[in-house]
Amino acid sequence: MRIFILAIYLFTLAFTSNAATHQNGMTRAYSLLEDAKKEGGETYAPSVMKEAIFFYEQAERELKNGNNKRAEEFRLISEIRSRTAISIARKKIYANELQRLNSEIEETNSIKKAYEDELRKNAATLEQIKDRMAISQDRMLSSALDKLERASGRIKAAEDVSSEDFNPGILDEARQTYIKAEESLASGEYQRSIELSEKAIALGERAYDQSKTKFKLRSNILSKVTGIYRTETEPIKSGLMVSIYGVFAPSGRTILFDAFPSLDAIAGVLAEYPNLKVGIEGSTNEEKSEEGNTNLANIQAEAVKKYLVAKGLSPQRFRIISAGLREGGNDKTRDPHIELILELFDSDNT
Amino acid sequence: MLAILFFLFSFSYSLPKDEDEEILSNIKTLETRLSSIEVGSAGIPTEELNKASQWIREAKISPDFYSTGFTRILVEKAFYQIEFLNNLIDESMIKKEVDEKKELLQKMKNQAEELKTINTQVVEEINRLEPR
């Protein structure tokens, strides 16, 4: 009896354990069915889903009838169909995404091509601009060199008409401007170099124009004065310096007769240029003292003035330069003489 | 008793009928299909391949105890499993293709963006050299 009860007990235990296992399996199968539905199995693989449900129901039926082995197989098939439905649904979703991606790739490719075309066009334009600029740069360099050469020429021309003497300020400015133009050219600033060269040209021309008149005047006077007996003529900054020798006897205050021709000739030249101002300075070293020499020199200068005025020249033209006060005075070792400073650059002489 | 035993024995070991030949043929087909899947089985979990292999074996050795086509059910199970494996392969391939396309798309977008940036720089340079 005990054995019988024990057998029944063990059988029941086995049966319930077995039943629980099958129930767990069915739960799993059902869960898979639900997952397949959620993943779109009914939309994308309806026939497979139907099969999954059919086999699940078959499994339930077989379980009810006690056919556990068959139930197990049907359950497994249901699971396989559910998972197949999931796989098919995923494939369809991937296929849709692939389609979308292909479309987007095509669109992006078009955009990329458009950018490529535009870039190609703009790159060509940039290339053309750079080519034009390179040509332009070459032309500018050529122009800058040309201007520099002309500026150099104008400055040289101004120097040839003694602008150093007549317009030192303007000439100096022209030179400085020329140097800056050269520096700009060297550093590649062609436009600036051209502008500076043009300024240097203008300054050089101005210096030349203002100087050539004076230069011509001085040259004319020089040619007239040079050759007068007992005279030496020297161009100076302000005009001309005419040194007349042997005008007075040693320590004399009266003009020697021999000097008259020279003074007359000078008077004649001065008469041709009525606007010419004249400074007169005596230069002597015959007296013992400096003061004495100065006094004698001044007296002699006054005498020459008086003589020239007597020849019809206006006294306002003359001024006596006190000996020793003139800058750059003559060497005292030279013979006594009278110096006439012909001042070409007073405003009346322009 | 002997007669009954003999009858039962001959019933168990009777010659295959047409239906059995069909099942055998199906099993052979499944084996061939499984072989071709195993060749290109990248992306398929080994566990699933083993299931197919095991179920085909079970179908091959299954005596049809129930005479209700139990072997046929086993064959069907193996068939569905192989169909599942084929779908897994397709799914893996198409997923790979999607990933590659995504990568390609991103690369193209980056290239387009780069072209756009370069183009902007070129236009700026043009405007700088020749202001409008």
Image (spheres, grey):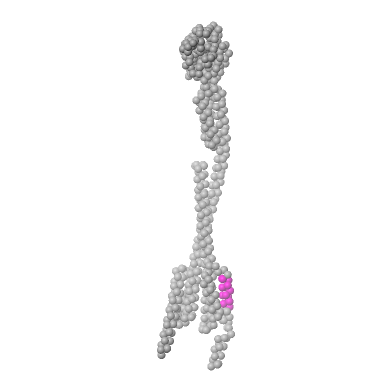
Q: Quick check: can you spot residue A249?
A: yes
Rendered residue at 52%/22% (across/down): A165
Rendered residue at 56%/23% (across/down): A160
Q: Nearer the viewer, residue A49 or A70?
A: A70
Please state the extent of the stretch shown in magenta in the rendering: B25-38
Rendered residue at 56%/40% (across/down): A134
Rendered residue at 55%/25% (across/down): A158
Find residue A178 and report its horizontal and vertical position in percent: 53, 30
Find residue B76 and report its horizontal and vertical position in percent: 53, 77
- In the picture as drawn, the residue positioned furthest to the bottom comes out as B1
B29 in the magenta segment: yes
Q: Quick check: can you spot residue B79?
A: no
Find residue B9 and report its horizontal and vertical position in percent: 56, 88
Q: Is residue A212 above or below residue A262?
A: below
B59 in the magenta segment: no
Q: How many marks?
A: 0
The image quadrant that residue B58 belongs to is: bottom right
Q: Is residue B100 above or below residue A123?
A: below
The image quadrant that residue A15 belongs to is: bottom left
Find residue A206 and report its horizontal and vertical position in percent: 52, 25
Q: Quadrant location of the N terminus of chain A?
A: bottom left
- Seen in the image, is A227 located left or right of residue A5? right
